[in-house]
Image (tube, rainbow, N blue to C red):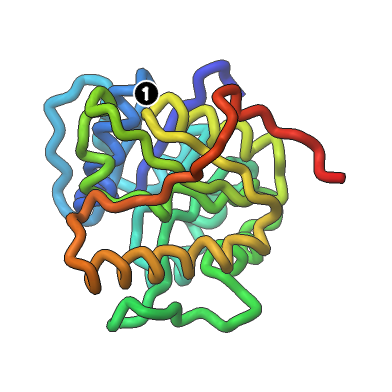
Amino acid sequence: MSAQPRIAIIGAAGTMGSALARRTAAAGYHVVVHDRRPVVSTDPSIVVVSSPEEAITLADVVILAVPYDIERDLPASVLAGLAGRIVISMTNPLTPSMDDVVTPHDESAAEHLASQLPSSSVVKALNTISAAALQRSPSDGEVFDTFVASDDREAAYVIEDLIRRMGFRPWYVGGLILSRTLERMTALLIGIAMRYRLDDTVGWYVKGAPSDQEERPLP
């Protein structure tokens, strides 16, 4: 992989995908985007292409900024293109009431994706950050924490660096099995925000973290 990985965002016309594209480009990455709907960008560092397959071929890291039902049923041509790449699953498979997930208790959306991509490095990340938080300037001062799960630790390092450059603080939580917890955390956060009428920039913050945030081996 190149020193600065090339990023593809599939689903870049949505609120989340478009905010993510701008934030990633602002962090200095070369970004390629695609959506079935028209994507409008005046940023020269964001390249719009005509198919997801084309976007994937131009990238080292692919972010799937799509709803769960689309991620679950990706076309064979897209799955083939994702082989050998780092793939971020950022979807939250929530019920219509947004208080639970629709996936079985023993499988997350990210784990299902990984089962279809045996030669890819699937990473669960960015799913606990709201579009509103992505749209805020990194200079606003408030730094949200977000969480990364993957069975490929080296791929997780790449995504942690991406998140850090975007102005957030990443925490590696462990293997992809913990994506089950991360996907439910979004339902929890939405419930808190709705119940207490908090604004849509609500997020997670790990209190008491050391300033160096150095990962230490588990005993």
Q: Residue at x 48, y 69 (%)?
A: 184
Which x, y percent locates residue 203? 35, 51
Residue 166 appearing in the image: yes
Q: Residue at x 71, y 40 (%)?
A: 153
Q: Is residue 210 above or below residue 119?
A: above
147 or 152: nearer the eye? Answer: 147
Residue 165 lies in quadrant: top left
* Horizontal relation, residue 200 to residue 81: left or right: left
Which x, y percent locates residue 152? 71, 44
Which x, y percent locates residue 145? 45, 42
Secondary structure at numbered mark 1: loop
Q: Could you tell me which quadrant the C terminus lies in?
A: top right
Q: Is residue 215 above or below residue 63?
A: above
* Horizontal relation, residue 135 to residue 124: left or right: left
Q: Could you tell me which quadrant the N terminus lies in?
A: top right
Q: Is residue 45 above or below residue 171?
A: above
Q: Residue at x 24, y 73 (%)?
A: 195
* Horizontal relation, residue 151 to residue 160: left or right: right
Task: Name the kind of residue labelled 1 in the image.
Answer: His
Give the residue at the far right of this rendering.
219
